[in-house]
Amino acid sequence: MSEAPQPDPVATGQIEPRATIRFRPATVEDIDAIHGLIDEASRTTTVLPRKRENICEKLRDFLVGERDGRIIACGALALFSPVLAEIRSLVVAPDCRGQGAGVQLVGALLAEARRIGLHRVFALTDNPPFFERSGFRIVDKHTLPQKVWTDCINCPLYLSCTEEAVEIRL
Ligand SMILES: CC(C)(COP(=O)(O)OP(=O)(O)OC[C@H]1O[C@@H](n2cnc3c(N)ncnc32)[C@H](O)[C@@H]1OP(=O)(O)O)[C@@H](O)C(=O)NCCC(=O)NCCS
């Protein structure tokens, strides 16, 4: 005998519906929150640390994800040429991961890339499957321009880098 379907806990008011995430360009008010997200992630992942000054300087590259007045995600689109940009500093707050925020944020960054007329977006990542969900594919690192590697020189993992390059054509 099949079990009776369980009532939807949101519909029955047992739990609050999860508020949607609003993705928007970062403002100066978001600098500390962005710094906090990147700082935390840089301690446990290959995300490169960034100083507040650097975040401020590159603030217009950033989108943030806001839910219930809290910044729960950030990501930047760094331009290398009129056709090419990199997704950088992509972080979702640890307690908000696995709920779709990361995929939505990548979608918002790609929408912005299309809006400004870019043709290619890439990322360097040790998590290619995450990007493949959004249509990226793994490419040979050497197909990326030399100046992509400028930041790598300061990375402690420079000589033992495990990251792969993933790319999407828009
Ligand atoms: C990577 C990161 C941004 C993903 O954000 P998120 O909000 O957890 O991601 P989402 O919930 O949108 O999507 C995760 C999906 O990708 C899948 N996924 C994630 N990592 C995966 C992996 N290593 N292999 C296969 N699938 C993976 C999950 O199964 C999930 O799929 P589901 O929706 O079917 O369950 C987040 O984990 C993060 O901030 N990590 C630390 C910072 C970091 O490493 N950033 C660098 C990314 S280059």
Image: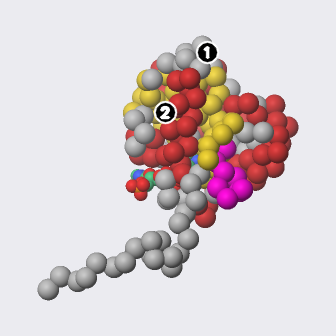
Categorize mark 1 by other alpha carbons within 10 Å: few (<14), some (14-19), many (20+).
few
Q: Quadrant of residue 155?
A: top right
Q: Which residue is mark 2?
A: 165
Mark 1 residue type: Ser
Q: Is residue 127 left or right of residue 148?
A: left
Q: Helix or strand or loop: what does disc 1 sit on? A: loop
Q: Is residue 66 magenta?
A: yes
Q: Nearer the viewer, residue 157 or 20?
A: 20
Q: Position of residue 109 (x, y in %)?
A: 57, 34
Q: Quadrant of the C terminus?
A: top left
Residue located farthest toward the top when viewing the structure as drawn: 82
Residue at point 47% right, 71% down?
10
Highlighted range, magenta: 64-72
Helix, strand or loop for the magenta stretch, by majority: strand
From the image, tell me which residue sits under label 1. Answer: 81
Q: Nearer the viewer, residue 160 or 99?
A: 99
